[in-house]
Image: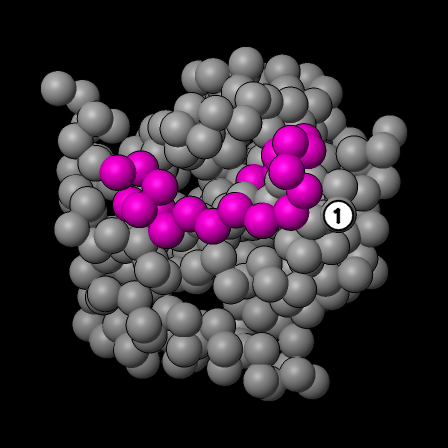
Amino acid sequence: MSYACRVDVLARNNVSVSGREGAAPILFAHGLGCDQSMWRHAAPAFEGDHRVVLFDHVGFGGSDLSAYDPHRYASLDGYADDVVELVEELGLGPVVFVGHSVSSMIGVLAAVRRPDLFERLVLVGPSPRYVDDGAYHGGFSREEIDELLETMDANYLGWSQAMGPVVMGVPDRPELGSELADAFCRTDPAVGRRFARATFLSDNRDDLPRCDTPALVLQCRQDAIAPVEVGRYVADQLPDARFVMLDAVGHCPNLSAPRQVVAAIKDFLGS
């Protein structure tokens, strides 16, 4: 019996569906340490023209924690498998997948495996590799990533409080940094640490040329997690991609600049 048959996929991922019945589906995926509430300022803007699907990755938000398997989720592949199973279970046909941060690459992996299930991809702050490698600038040295992971191991709550504002990147709006830090803190530390390893030690550069699904890459002009060079790299390596620079800073424009995110996605879908 397959893994998908042993679990209720929709309950596992705390799936919620809204919007217009029978309309084209659009699926929103959150980033590291977050949940579907990170899309609350953007997703409702699509309910008039789309079937809107929100979900939580296993181990986060309202997902079924009993479904968490440290082996399955040791890499991004397990999360990509979940996305494929979720789209199959919903039976909504090819979807528009909108992924924030690490979920961008999870969406790419899912689309490479099952291109028939994905009509378009929207990648918000994507990074196929966070560690610098020769001429490739990922934004971090291996020593910096190792130090980050060691800090998480030693003091996960302290790391969460410190990193929330850094990741959000909008010091003039401290409430958003606090919200992200609180989301990190609500996550089981063991789950959060494993997901961080799967994220920051991943290298999915070779998967980009294999993804033929039309894509939109949304990049903030200043991002401490995914630099501009990385966003341009992703768009250049994908066979069919459009790059859009948002007039925004930080790694979470879905919270800090949702109107720009919504406008860019609607323009892409209407093209």
Q: Is residue 1 left or right of residue 61?
A: left
The amino acid type of the residue labelled 1 equals: Gly
Coordinates of residue 156 in the picture (x, y in percent): 26, 72
Outermost residue toward the front?
A: 21
Q: Nearer the viewer, residue 144 or 244?
A: 244
Q: Is residue 177 magenta?
A: no
- State the residue at coordinates (26%, 38%): 8
Q: Nearer the viewer, residue 108 or 38?
A: 38
| Residue 96, quarter of picture | top right
Quadrant for the C terminus, please: top right
In this rendering, the answer to whether 270 lies above or below 12 is above
Does the rendering let one see residue 203?
Answer: no
Coordinates of residue 67 in the picture (x, y in percent): 19, 45
- State the residue at coordinates (54%, 57%): 225
Coordinates of residue 233 in the picture (x, y in percent): 66, 34
Q: Which residues are magenta?
A: 8-27
Residue position for label 1: 48
Q: Is residue 22 magenta?
A: yes
